[in-house]
Image: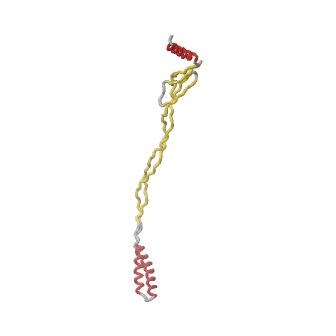
Amino acid sequence: MSTYYSSRFALAVLLAGSGLLAEGFSTTEYINVTKSIPNYSTVQEEIPSEKCYDVQEKVSSGGTNNDIVGAVVGGALGGVLGHQVGGGKGKTAATVGGAVLGTLAGQNVGSKYNTQATSSYQTVRKCETTTIVKTRQVLGGYTNVAKLKGKEITVESDQPMKQIPVTVTYSY
């Protein structure tokens, strides 16, 4: 035999012998799923809601301010008339006194012509925003169950599975 063939033969025998001397090997087996359990999670949603209603509100229409106008006009006229009376330092006192008396008289006369405020009602729309919380169940995936040699195996997935791949190691 040539050296080339004898080295190849030795290599083949060595590989075959190591396979026989190996302590074990691994393989992938597919185990049938016995049940797929859906997994649900609870989701809460907040939904805004608006409630509106009509309300009667009192509205007053204000009267005129004749008493204020009368006081201003009366004070001015009283001051002018008071200035016409007296002389020197008395003229200043007469002007101030005339303005004060004219203000009081003008306010009194103006209040007699003051109209009363009237009240009426108008419809006003009022709205309130409330939040309604709704709860619902959402499918989150599946727990797939299979049995291998009396032991239960579970695998989570987004779809139900028919088989679960399992790596099995045999040793001897």
- The C terminus - image quarter: top right
Q: Residue at x 43, y 78 (%)?
A: 103
Residue 150 image-quadrant placement: top right
How many numbered circles are shown?
0
**For residue 151, above or below residue 122:** above
* Residue nearest the viewer, comparing 167 with 90: 167
Q: How is the image coloured?
A: secondary structure
* Residue nearest the viewer, comparing 130 with 110: 130
Q: Residue at x 43, y 56 (%)?
A: 56
Q: Position of residue 18 (x, y in %)?
A: 56, 17
* Residue nearest the viewer, comparing 64 with 13: 13
- Horizontally, residue 99 falls left or right of residue 31, namely left
**For residue 81, above or below residue 170:** below
Residue 57 image-quadrant placement: bottom left
Q: Position of residue 15 (x, y in %)?
A: 54, 17
**For residue 59, above or below residue 84:** above
Q: Residue at x 49, y 32 (%)?
A: 141
Q: Residue furthest front?
A: 3
- Horizontally, residue 171 falls left or right of residue 127, namely right
**For residue 113, above or below residue 45:** below
Q: Position of residue 118 (x, y in %)?
A: 41, 65
- Horizontally, residue 108 falls left or right of residue 27, namely left
- Horizontally, residue 36 falls left or right of residue 123, namely right
Q: Position of residue 97 (x, y in %)?
A: 45, 83
Q: Residue furthest bottom?
A: 87
